[in-house]
């Protein structure tokens, strides 16, 4: 007899289809006379959208994660990168991506489909360099926008304009290299969809405050990924609103992710993609990971509400504001993205600690699991100070070392042993007969 | 001849304490060679670069995750161990993520009265960087004025910028002497000369440079030059390593790293607006890889140096875990090799197995040709 | 109340039998390739040693790497908790425990009741301790026991890179080539390992008193280096090898209520 009822996600099938379609569209773009480009998940994908409705792209990080999930292929890619002489401690997404490019093996079958240009933004050290190499290897044009202008709370006109000016420049550059006339209406549409998409994802995350949590983090990974693929897309914005409605229905009917939820945890940084089963292991203790700053704030856009709580950022449309010009669209786009939670800690780990403690409070979290991710210097930046801050606030916290994209650096047995110790600290014993969460691995 | 520079380099804390006793100002620690020291100096403060001490340490693990570079951890260790307890202010002009953590952890755990984080652009290749950064420097100036209670006038900035230019010019002049077939100074001398400049009042550094230059020009070293080498990498003030390399039949005649030529290579050009001029100088300087995109400007710059200084071979010094330099390493190596410059790749930590490296360096020198060793 | 604790270590199985809180018997045996058989044998030995039949035991708890396959058990517990509980039973006033095995070094922060409050582990970088010491003793052609004693003969401080075991090994080779006396090298190695451990333990905070357990606690050279690094004297409990099994036996007692 479990504590809560559970039910598979109805939109699960659609989630899978949308993702595969995205990768297929990119692959087939040229055959339909369309444009292909590549860049990071944080790139301003709304901007190239102004070139037409046949513009497709792949974002490096989710693509790298897809490769990492396929451990055999990933190893080939990593070794190909090492054979070229690249160091093993470089961003593991990047190494997977480069390997896929060198071997010309597309993670979704067939050859690596060549992009027409690279378009990126830069906040961590590797961002700008990643596509610099892709561009020189494939001999294609490259434009990268510097967004490292400081935390959102200190944003001023000078800093905003630095980003916006580069964005304007990038549009001129896009026109030049593609020979296409830029369409501002498409940009405006894309920006509006992006605000809707990322705000809706934050709504989904908020619903996980409920007890029992309607979603577990492993499931959320398969859902937040769409926002990393094409956050400006109408389809994905629509999907997130549909998802939000379904999750609300689950909350209203007390439908749980983990039918024996007794303990709520929070993680941090990207998970070890080749070993997501550690989340299933947690379920054996009745422990559910309700999310993380990463899951919430990589794509989700948030704001502080009048009562001091954290909630989805109000979109321009919700404020009754209509974007009418290219400049306005770019300003909204820049401001919107600069408020991204996962961009704040690059300047001060204390900002991240604050946000994490906010999540602990609002989502009623019992313990925090920090993945010391050797594969990502960006999200691991300052993580030990986060640990100190969380521990000093009296919240139980554990760390485990691993690598999001390099399975050779993940010691499953050790991590399981760490989890066992942590669960003991929390006073949680294994369930006698655990019923797993409903989504398949 | 370089004894004073060695003294400054080895006794940096004594110098700083002495300066504090004699001056009515504070010492401000800079955490990257991009820090616009001119503003700090013009405020009557002494800017000093915080470097590590090349010793093993056990204090930083709770603060900086072990997979970030040993250098940034060595830097933080100095603060945690109280070696800079006389230093009341710190500042960072952002570049890489690694060193950034030294700054933020320092701020959290080492008592300071003043700190300022400069959001220096990483895209130095856009024209928009100039006006953006000039505005950020205005903020920095205001902040320094508030802390010190002193006004930083444009004249004092201009004077300071000229003082710094003079220091750069003088060091360039010394470097130029290394182009000769028998350089009158070793790579070790040069390294310490530059590194010592981080720690002292530029006025004094200039005075010493001016003093030795005439004699230096006619100096004849009692050693064989041997193979002419260049070192390229990130932060490196590993004097043990340099000593070893120069003891096995070679001389380091030029470098590209941030405790070397990158720090002083270009001058401030004056157009009438001193703060923007200073901003321009820092944006245009030889870049750290983290700021070298979309184009690779670093590669032709290094090649030019190799040509000008008639280098025979290049040692690539890769600080372990330093992502920015690792991300350049493959194209850099290929570029140099295809332009006729053999390279030796060595991975560095804050202490290095000099014995093992010696074997590799000797093998490299042999490969570069016996006729070079005479 | 009669309980037993079985510590299924990767190298050795240890068993402790407790009656009303007093140790009545113990035994140790090599794990080999048949951990279950080894555990059964060891449990029998401990039972004989205590004069108590296995069937008379109220509750048996296992711990250690192989705890899930231990025979005759009523429950299992992680070796972290077992070690903490065992130490608190043997020593007063301990707030920090350092546990160094062959493969893993740990820093454990405990409260007054022996409950684990925080944990740090030697991660991939600067990994290992016991295994490294063994490798270095082989490189110097001395036994592991001699290696520790040798280091105590030195009064030099030769800095060795404390971060990367591979770099450190390179440095040892350099020292050998430079004809550095063996005892000085031995001390340098011990200092380097101790430094890694101290570094790791700082994450949980070095709060006195500090206890040291695990195989490396038998190495006097290492204990000396650790004391210098921590700037305090660590306390090694009697029979440090049995601490885990003892802790498991104590926890067995709590669980059978």
Image (tube, coloured by chain):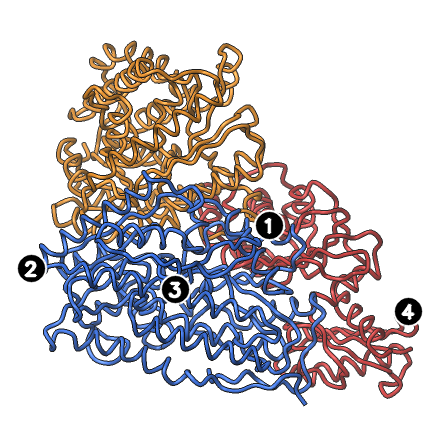
Chain colours: A blue, B orange, C red
Q: Are marks 3 and 4 on the same chain?
A: no
Q: Residue at x 58, y 82 (%)?
A: A253
Q: Residues within 10 Å of mark 3 (few under 14, many from 20)?
A: many
Q: Residue at x 75, y 73 (%)?
A: C14
State the residue in front, A42 or B9: A42
| Chain on which label 4 sits | C
Q: Residue furthest left?
A: A179
| Chain on which label 2 sits | A
In contact (CB < 8 Å): disc 3 and disc 1: no
Residue B243 image offset from top left, x and y in percent: 35, 32
In contact (CB < 8 Å): disc 2 and disc 3: no
Mark 2 → mark 3, Cα distance in angstroms: 31 Å
| Chain on which label 3 sits | A
Side (left or right) of A100 relative to B348: left
Q: Nearer the viewer, mark 2 or mark 4?
A: 2
User: Mark 1 — residue?
Assistant: A389
User: Mark 4 — residue?
Assistant: C22
Residue B143 sits above or below residue A439 on the image: above
Which type of secondary structure does the marked residue at label 4 adopt?
Answer: strand
User: Mark 2 — residue?
Assistant: A179
Q: Nearer the viewer, mark 1 or mark 2?
A: 2
Side (left or right) of A139 relative to C165: left
Which type of secondary structure does the marked residue at label 2 adopt?
Answer: loop
Query: Which numbered disc covers residue A198?
Result: 3
Mark 3 → mark 4, Cα distance in angstroms: 62 Å
Mark 2 → mark 4, Cα distance in angstroms: 86 Å
State the residue in front, A51 or A148: A51
Q: Is residue A377 at least partly visible in the picture?
A: no
């Amino acid at each position: 007899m479990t504590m809560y009822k559970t039910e598979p996600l109805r939109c699960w099938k659609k989630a899978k289809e949308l993702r595969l379609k995205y990768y297929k569209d990119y692959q087939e773009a040229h055959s339909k006379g369309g444009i292909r480009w590549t860049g990071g998940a944080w790139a301003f994908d709304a901007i190239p959208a102004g070139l037409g409705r046949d513009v497709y792209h792949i974002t490096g990080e989710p693509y790298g994660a897809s490769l990492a999930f396929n451990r055999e292929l990933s190893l080939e890619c990593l070794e190909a990168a090492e054979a070229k002489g690249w160091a093993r401690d470089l961003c593991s997404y990047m190494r997977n991506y480069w390997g896929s490019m060198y071997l010309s093996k597309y993670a979704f079958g067939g050859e690596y489909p060549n992009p027409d240009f690279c378009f990126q933004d830069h906040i961590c050290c590797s961002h700008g360099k990643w596509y610099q190499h892709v561009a020189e290897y494939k001999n294609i044009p490259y434009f990268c926008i510097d967004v490292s202008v400081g935390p959102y709370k200190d944003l001023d006109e000078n800093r905003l304009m630095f980003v916006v000016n580069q964005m304007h420049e990038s549009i001129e550059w896009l026109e030049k290299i593609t020979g296409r006339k830029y369409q501002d209406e498409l940009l405006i549409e894309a920006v509006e969809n992006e605000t809707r998409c990322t705000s809706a994802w934050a709504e989904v995350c908020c619903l996980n405050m409920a007890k029992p949590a309607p979603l577990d983090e492993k499931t959320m990974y398969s859902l937040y990924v769409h926002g990393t693929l094409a956050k400006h897309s109408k389809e994905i914005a629509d999907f997130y609103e549909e998802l939000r409605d379904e999750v609300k229905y689950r909350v209203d009917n007390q439908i749980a992710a983990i039918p024996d939820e007794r303990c709520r945890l929070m993680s941090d940084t990207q998970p070890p993609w080749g070993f997501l089963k550690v989340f299933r292991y947690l379920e054996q203790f009745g422990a559910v990971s309700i999310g993380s700053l990463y899951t919430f704030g990589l794509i989700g856009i948030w704001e502080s509400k009048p009562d001091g709580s954290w909630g989805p950022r109000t979109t321009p449309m919700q404020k009754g504001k209509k974007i009418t010009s290219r400049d306005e669209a770019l300003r909204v786009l820049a401001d919107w993205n600069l408020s991204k939670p996962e961009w704040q800690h690059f300047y001060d780990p204390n900002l991240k600690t604050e946000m994490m403690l906010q999540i602990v409070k609002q989502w009623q979290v019992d313990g925090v699991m920090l993945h010391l991710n050797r594969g990502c210097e960006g999200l691991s930046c300052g993580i030990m100070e986060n640990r100190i801050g969380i521990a000093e606030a009296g919240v139980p916290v554990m760390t485990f070392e691993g690598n999001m994209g390099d399975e050779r650096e993940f010691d499953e047995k050790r991590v399981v042993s760490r989890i066992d110790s942590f669960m003991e600290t929390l006073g949680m014993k294994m369930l006698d007969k655990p019923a797993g969460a409903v989504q398949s691995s | 001849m370089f004894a004073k520079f060695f003294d400054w380099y080895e006794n940096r804390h004594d110098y700083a304490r002495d300066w504090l006793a004699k001056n009515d100002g504070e010492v401000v620690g800079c955490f990257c060679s991009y820090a616009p020291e001119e503003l700090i100096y013009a405020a009557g403060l002494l800017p000093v670069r915080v470097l590590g001490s090349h010793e093993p340490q056990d204090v930083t693990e709770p603060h900086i995750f072990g997979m970030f570079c040993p250098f940034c951890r060595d830097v933080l260790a100095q603060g945690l161990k109280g070696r800079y307890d006389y230093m009341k202010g710190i500042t960072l002009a952002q570049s890489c993520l690694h060193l950034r953590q030294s700054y933020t952890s320092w701020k959290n755990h080492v008592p300071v009265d003043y700190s300022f984080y400069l959001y220096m652009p990483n895209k130095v290749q856009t024209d928009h960087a100039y006006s953006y950064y000039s505005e950020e420097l205005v903020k920095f100036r205001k902040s320094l004025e508030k802390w010190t209670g002193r006004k930083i006038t444009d004249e004092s900035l201009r004077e300071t910028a000229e003082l710094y230019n003079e220091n750069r010019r003088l060091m360039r002049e010394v470097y130029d002497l290394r182009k000769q077939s028998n350089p009158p100074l070793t790579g070790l001398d040069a390294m310490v000369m530059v590194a010592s400049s981080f720690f002292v009042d530029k006025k004094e550094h200039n005075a010493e440079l001016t003093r030795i230059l005439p004699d230096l020009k006619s100096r004849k070293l009692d050693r064989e030059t041997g193979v002419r080498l260049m070192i390229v990498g990130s932060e490196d003030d590993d004097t043990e390593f340099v000593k070893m390399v120069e003891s096995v039949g070679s001389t380091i005649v030029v470098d590209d790293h941030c405790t070397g030529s990158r720090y002083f290579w270009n001058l401030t050009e004056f157009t009438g607006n001193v703060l923007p001029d200073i901003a321009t100088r820092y944006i245009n300087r030889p870049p750290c890889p983290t700021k070298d995109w979309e184009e690779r400007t670093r590669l032709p710059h290094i090649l030019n140096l190799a040509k000008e200084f008639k280098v025979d071979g290049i040692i690539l010094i890769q600080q372990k875990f330093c992502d920015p330099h690792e991300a350049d390493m493959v194209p850099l190596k290929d570029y140099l090799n295809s332009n006729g410059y053999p390279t030796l790749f060595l991975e560095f930590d804050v202490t290095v197995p000099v014995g093992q490296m010696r074997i590799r360096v000797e093998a490299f020198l042999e490969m570069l040709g016996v006729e070079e060793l005479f | 109340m009669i309980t037993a604790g079985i510590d299924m270590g990767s190298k050795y199985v240890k068993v402790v039998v407790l009656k009303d809180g007093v140790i009545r018997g113990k035994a140790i045996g090599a794990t080999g390739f048949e951990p279950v058989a080894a555990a059964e044998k060891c449990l029998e030995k401990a039972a004989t040693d205590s004069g108590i039949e296995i069937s008379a035991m109220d509750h048996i708890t296992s711990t250690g790497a192989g705890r899930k396959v231990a025979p005759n058990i009523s429950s299992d517990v992680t070796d972290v908790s077992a070690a903490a509980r065992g130490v608190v039973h043997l020593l007063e006033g301990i707030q920090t425990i350092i546990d160094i095995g062959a493969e893993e070094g740990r820093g454990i922060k405990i409260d007054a009741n022996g409950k684990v409050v925080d944990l740090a582990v030697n991660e991939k970088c600067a990994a290992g301790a016991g295994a490294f010491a063994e490798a270095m003793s082989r490189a110097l052609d001395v036994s592991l026991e001699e290696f520790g004693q040798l280091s105590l003969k030195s009064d030099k401080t030769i800095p060795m890179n404390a971060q990367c075991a591979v770099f450190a090994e390179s440095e040892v080779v350099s020292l050998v080539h430079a004809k550095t006396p063996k005892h000085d090298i031995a001390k340098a190695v011990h200092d380097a390992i101790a430094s890694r451990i101290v570094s790791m333990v700082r994450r949980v905070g070095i709060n006195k008193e500090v206890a040291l357990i695990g195989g490396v606690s038998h190495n006097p050279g290492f204990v000396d280096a650790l004391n210098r690094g921590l700037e305090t004297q660590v306390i090694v409990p009697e029979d440090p090898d049995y601490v885990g099994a003892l802790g498991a036996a104590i926890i067995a007692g709590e669980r059978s209520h």
